[in-house]
Amino acid sequence: MAERKLDGIWNAERLLHELLYFSDDRGRIREMNLSDDSPYGIKVRRFASAMKAYGKEECLYLGNEHLVSDACSEEKMEELCLLLKHNLHDKYSTDFATPDFLKGVRERRDLFKTLFQYRKSLDKVENTWSGVMECSHIVAIGIKATDNLYQTHIKAASDILDRMLVLLMGDDYDKSFTEAELLPYGYPDVTDRELEDMILDNW
C-alpha cells in the first residue's frame, strides 16, 4: 500500500491558476465558505491557507490586483518588459525608456488587473467542454477540433500571460510551500488522491 503523503507544492504559478478558478469574470474572488467540508470546500480551504501563508489573506475579500507585491526585482521587471515589448507596436517603445516605467505598485496592479481579465477569458475557452460527459460522434468531432485549435494556437498565449502575471505579482512569492508546511495555516489534511476519491464518491 502506498504511503500517505501530503507532497504537493504551492508556488506563484499554482496560486495564479487557483485564482483563475476561484475568480469571477471581473477578476474578483467569489465568496468562500471556509467551514465547508465538501470536495469544493477543501479546494477553497487549500487556496485560502496558501493565501494566508503568503500574507495575502486580505485578498480573499479585496480585488485580486492586491496580490501584487510592493517590491518587484529588477530581474522580474526586465523579463516582463521583454515580454511586453515583443507583443507591442513600436509606438509604445518610448514608454520602456522612461526610468520609472512600471516602478509604482499602482501601475503594476492596473496592468495585472487588465492582463488577468483577458487571461480569465482564455481560461473559459480552455474549459468550454469540461462539463461534457457524453455526446454524439459528430459533437465529439467538433469538440476535438476546437480543443486542437486551442492547443495549437491559444495555449501559447495563455502560457505567456501566466508568466507576465507571475512576474507582476512580484517578490512576495519567491518562496514555495509544501502542503505539509501549510498545515499550520489551516491547510486541510487531505491528499490529492483522497480528494479525488471524495469527488468520485460525491458524483
Image: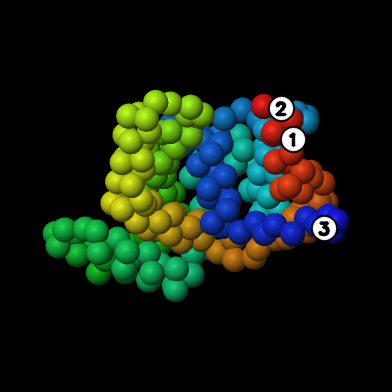
Tag 3's secondary structure? Answer: loop
Q: In the rendered image of this protein, does residue 4 appear above or below residue 194?
A: below
> Does 21 sit left or right of 149 as displayed?
right
In the image, farthest residue toward the left: 91
In front: mark 3 or mark 1? Answer: 3
Q: How many labels does the image show?
A: 3
Disc 1 to disc 2, C-alpha distance = 6 Å
Disc 3 to disc 1, C-alpha distance = 18 Å
Mark 1: few/some/many CA within 10 Å (<14, 14-19, 20+): some
Q: In the rendered image of this protein, does residue 106 appear above or below residue 117?
A: below
Residue topped by disc 3? 2
Which amino acid is tagged 1?
Answer: Met
What number is the disc on residue 198? 1
The image quarter containing residue 91 is: bottom left
The mark nearer the N terminus, 2 or 3, is 3
Mark 3: few/some/many CA within 10 Å (<14, 14-19, 20+): few
Tag 1's secondary structure? Answer: helix
Which amino acid is tagged 2?
Answer: Asn
Q: Which of 114 and 19 is in front in this view?
A: 19
What number is the disc on residue 81? none
Q: Which of 173 and 133 is in front in this view?
A: 133
Disc 2 to disc 3, C-alpha distance = 24 Å
The mark nearer the N terminus, 3 or 1, is 3
Q: Which of 87 and 40 is in front in this view?
A: 40
Residue at horizontal 33 percent and vertical 36 percent from the top: 141
Tag 2's secondary structure? Answer: loop
Residue 203 lies, in percent from the top left, at: 67, 27
Q: Do the residues labelled 1 and 2 touch (CB within 8 Å)?
A: yes
Q: Which of 57 and 94 is in front in this view?
A: 57
